[in-house]
Image (tube, rainbow, N blue to C red):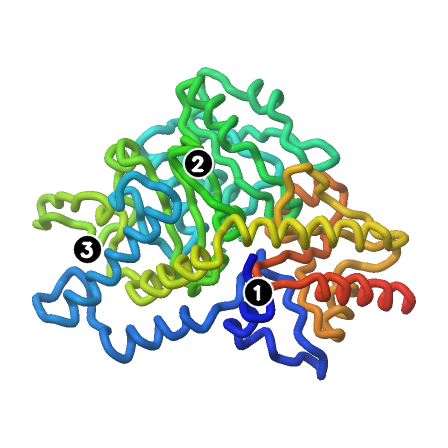
Amino acid sequence: MYSLEEVRKDFPILSREIYGRPLVYLDNAATTQKPREVVEAIEREYYSVNANVHRGVHFLSQQATELHEQARRRVARFIGARSEREIIFTRGTTESLNLVAFSFGEACMSEGDEVILTTMEHHSNIVPWQMLHDRRGIVIRVAPIDERGVLDLEALERLFTGRTRLVAVTHVSNVLGTVNPVEAITTMAHAHGIPVLVDGAQSVPHFPIDVEAIGCDFLTFSGHKVYGPTGIGVLYGREEWLDRLPPYQGGGEMISHVSFERTTYEQLPYKFEAGTPDYVGSAALAQALDYVDDLGRDCIRAHERDLTRYAMERLGAIPGLHLYGEAEDKDAVVAFNVEGIHHLDLGTLLDRLGIAVRTGHHCAQPLMERFGVEGMVRASFALYNTRAEVDALAEGIERVRRMF
Ligand code: PLP
């Protein structure tokens, strides 16, 4: 296990004070803080390498290109992809999901065809499919969850019909922390001849991911949730699928030849990367992945799981506090409401104590509806959080309770 005290020194922002109190940052599912190495990688690239990639014969362009392509190989290795041709750089999970909805929708779906989602999806894995519904008349089917926030696999299996074309499911719920059995879902879907997209926004930052072991056909994640910079994300797609799908956007970089009559497209992965890519972001993302692997993803998982269990225990003992998401396989998120206190009030008052939590619908309004609430408070953990911070949260909630 790594030393928390040492690790926290890598994140300068964690020593900030908010309203004169030490920052307790528990909004990591929204975005993580950045270690020095990542910010230094950005600075290094702008100060000494910066040039547009893939285009120049000159030294800097070639060096920047090499860093960008090295980053692609680093990502492939991080998630166990067979080849860097299966790694598409995007702006983040949302763009990756939109890319699949658009390109898969174009190539493989027509009116009446169905996509299977779950009740616990983030809006990013709902709205692009609704847009496809509006454009092409596809149908969205939704697999339910139980009261503990566990996906009903039998009900999911009953949703398969002759019109099913894709299953798109989050790996970990950003609200409940439920870890969905994506290996089993993939086996099930493949038995029906159907591909699977896994939204890995909340899994890739927390435990080892191997797309080959999962067997999924697509996987998405965001750099900023895994200690990397904002504005860069990843779509993994099996080469067989990516080869079949049309480009998402047109422009420079993604073409092989252009005339006014006809354009031919580049090979993978460039076919899906129109325009100047975020080559600074990709290099910094690679640095973030190195940072995570240096600490060890198994260690990070063990630490975060311990914090989550501790938080469930500590918060669960507070009278009037209702926890959401009690799956056995639960990752680094704890969502709750306290009787008689509006979630926004609770979040605002905790903030005054220096404690940063998320409040509201968490971009998962259908899930809020499932639990009959308008919003929740969410504390989410990262590799640098401590038990003392969980104590501060519990004491903060008690203090707010006494005010009501
Ligand atoms: N999917 C899940 C499960 C998420 O938690 C999030 C962000 O909170 C997203 C998708 C969207 O990620 P981004 O805003 O980085 O595109």
Secondary structure of residue under mark 1: loop
Q: CB atoms at circles 2 and 3 under 8 Å apart? A: no
Q: CB atoms at circles 3 and 1 under 8 Å apart? A: no
Secondary structure of residue under mark 3: loop
Residue at disc 2, CB closer than 8 Å to ligand 1: no
Label 3 packing within 10 angstroms: few (<14), some (14-19), many (20+): some
- Front disc: 1 or 2: 1
Return the disc, 3 or 1, that comes first in the chain's sequence.
Answer: 1
Which residue is at a point 44% across and 17% down the rendered structure image?
191
111, above or below 248, in the image: above
Where, by quadrant of the figure, is residue 196 drawn?
A: top left
Q: Amino acid at mark 2?
A: Leu
Return the disc, 2 or 3, that comes first in the chain's sequence.
Answer: 2
Q: Amino acid at mark 3?
A: Glu
For the residues labelled 3 and 1, the Cα–Cα distance comes to 44 Å
Is residue 200 found left or right of 232 in the rendered image?
Answer: right
Secondary structure of residue under mark 2: strand
- Residue for badge 2: 197
For the residues labelled 1 and 2, the Cα–Cα distance comes to 36 Å
| Rendered image: mark on residue 144 | none
Which residue is at a point 29% across and 76% down the rendered structure image?
46
Q: Nearer the viewer, residue 117 or 380?
A: 380
Where, by quadrant of the figure, is residue 136 drawn?
A: top left
Q: Amino acid at mark 1?
A: Ser
Is residue 280 found left or right of 120 in the rendered image?
Answer: left
Q: Quadrant of the C terminus?
A: bottom right
- Residue for badge 3: 253
| Rendered image: mark on residue 3 | 1
Return the disc, 1 or 2, that comes first in the chain's sequence.
Answer: 1
Which residue is at a point 11% across and 44% down the rendered structure image?
262
For the residues labelled 2 and 3, the Cα–Cα distance comes to 26 Å
Label 1 packing within 10 angstroms: few (<14), some (14-19), many (20+): few
